[in-house]
């Protein structure tokens, strides 16, 4: 029974190389993300972010381009765009002992910034799940003033 199943599996893989290759690639990426701290580790939703801001004086870091930041951002957020982010991490050293909430448009770029900050020794780094889109969908306040 097991031998027949393995033969069918090998035949399927041989007939569908692209499909199997895609499956292997996606599986590898999911496992890598789990091992490096993805999938919710260090992530907060908009409500959790407001609790961190109000109760632990968390710093909000917005990694969107300056043009997007000026159209609306979380109140008192600091803007360091991803385009030059790695060279500007030192600007955040004074906040290294505070929680840092990283936001972007939808949560993708901010997760990259979170990984970079953790590698630089920032312990309390949180990715805003859903980014500014989730923040605005929750009807939380947005500012257009630059800090």
Image (cartoon, rainbow, N blue to C red):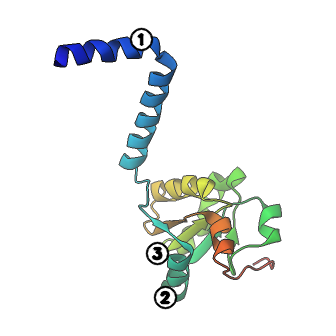
Q: Which of the marked residues, 1 or 3, is nearer the chain's N terminus? A: 1
Q: Does dot 1 land on a helix, a strand or a loop?
A: helix
Q: Position of residue 130 (x, y in %)?
A: 59, 63
Quadrant of the snapshot with the C terminus: bottom right
Q: Residues within 10 Å of mark 2 (few under 14, many from 20)?
A: few
- Can you identify the residue that label 2 sits on? 55
- Tell which of 112 and 138 is nearer to you: 138
Q: Nearer the viewer, residue 132 or 77?
A: 132
Q: Real-space Cα distance between discs 2 and 3? A: 15 Å
Mark 3 and mark 2 in contact (Cβ < 8 Å)? no
Quarter of the figure that contains the N terminus: top left
Q: CA distance from mark 1 to mark 3?
A: 53 Å
Q: Which residue is mark 1?
A: 14
Residue 97 numbered mark, or none: 3
The reply, left or right, for residue 127 in relation to residue 77 is: left
Please tell me which of labels 2 and 3 falls first in the chain.
Answer: 2
Q: Position of residue 110 (x, y in %)?
A: 59, 58
Mark 1 closeness class: few <14, some 14–19, many ≥20 residues within 10 Å? few
Q: Secondary structure at mark 3?
A: loop
């Amino acid at each position: 029974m097991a031998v027949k199943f393995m033969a069918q599996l090998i035949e399927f893989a041989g007939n569908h190389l692209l499909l199997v290759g895609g499956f292997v690639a996606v599986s590898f990426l999911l496992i890598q993300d789990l091992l490096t701290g993805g999938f919710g580790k260090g992530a907060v939703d908009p409500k959790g972010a407001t609790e961190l801001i109000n109760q632990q004086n968390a710093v909000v870091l917005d990694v969107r381009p300056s043009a997007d930041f000026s159209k609306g951002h979380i109140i008192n957020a600091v803007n360091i765009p991803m385009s030059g982010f790695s060279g500007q991490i030192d600007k955040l050293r004074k906040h290294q002992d505070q929680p840092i909430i990283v936001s972007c448009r939808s949560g993708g770029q901010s997760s990259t910034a979170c990984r970079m900050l953790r590698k630089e020794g920032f312990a309390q780094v949180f990715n805003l799940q859903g980014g500014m889109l989730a923040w605005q969908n929750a009807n939380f306040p947005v500012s257009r003033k630059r800090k």
